[in-house]
């Protein structure tokens, strides 16, 4: 039983770390795609150069990655514990958890983001990236969620 719980903890941690990385990549991809649309805010063009800055200055990329972990870690831990305790294995629920955790982390960074209509597109992009991150988390750790060992071992 202890070995199974340790395996689940490792899967949750691995799933979270990979999901954060994929979520950050999704943010960049969304900004690149949306910057090509007519009427896109001017700073969307600037956001598409972020990967170049991260490649040229790797400590910047590590800073963004760890900042994201700090901003979303508590929410993700709460959602992971809920999913594990209740054995919630639905992909759409993990995607919803990812979007909520991402937007909550964004709110910690920009507390008035929902009050300013200029930040709504950013909030939607963060939520969409959270959906992607939640799906990645589900693929790694969420499909077998639950601290209780399954009756039929696969």
Image (cartoon, rainbow, N blue to C red):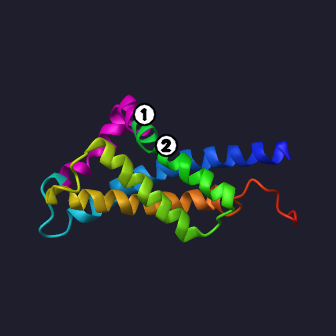
Magenta-highlighted residues = 44-66
State the residue at coordinates (11%, 68%): 39
State the residue at coordinates (38%, 63%): 128
State the residue at coordinates (54%, 49%): 78
Name the chief secondary structure element in magenta: helix
**Earlier residue among tags 1 and 2:** 1
Classify residue 152 by image quadrant.
Answer: bottom right
User: Of helix, strand and loop, which one carries label 2?
Assistant: helix
Direction from residue 83 to residue 115 in the image, left or right: left
In 3D space, how far apart are the residues under numbered discs 1 and 2 (Cα atoms)?
A: 19 Å
User: Of helix, strand and loop, which one carries label 1?
Assistant: helix
Q: Residues within 10 Å of mark 1 (few under 14, many from 20)?
A: few
Q: Residues within 10 Å of mark 2 (few under 14, many from 20)?
A: some
- Viewer-proximal residue, 82 or 70? 82
Image spot of residue 56 (x, y percent): 33, 34
- Viewer-proximal residue, 128 or 5? 5
Classify residue 83 by image quadrant.
Answer: bottom right
Label for residue 74? Answer: 2
Label for residue 62? Answer: 1
State the residue at coordinates (87%, 65%): 151
- Height in image: 47 above or below 59? below
């Amino acid at each position: 039983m202890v070995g199974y719980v340790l395996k689940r903890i490792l899967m949750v941690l691995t799933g979270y770390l990979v999901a954060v990385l994929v979520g950050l990549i999704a943010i960049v991809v969304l900004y690149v795609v949306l910057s090509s649309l007519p009427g896109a805010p001017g700073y969307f063009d600037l956001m598409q150069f972020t990967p170049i800055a991260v490649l040229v200055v790797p400590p910047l990329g590590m800073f963004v990655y760890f900042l994201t972990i700090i901003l979303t870690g508590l929410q993700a831990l709460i959602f992971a514990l809920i999913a594990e305790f209740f054995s919630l294995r639905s992909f759409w629920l993990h995607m919803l958890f990812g979007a909520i955790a991402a937007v909550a982390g964004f709110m910690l960074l920009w507390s008035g983001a929902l009050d300013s209509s200029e930040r709504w597109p950013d909030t939607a992009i963060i939520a969409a990236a959270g959906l992607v991150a939640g799906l990645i988390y589900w693929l790694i750790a969420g499909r077998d969620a639950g601290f209780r060992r399954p009756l039929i071992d696969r």
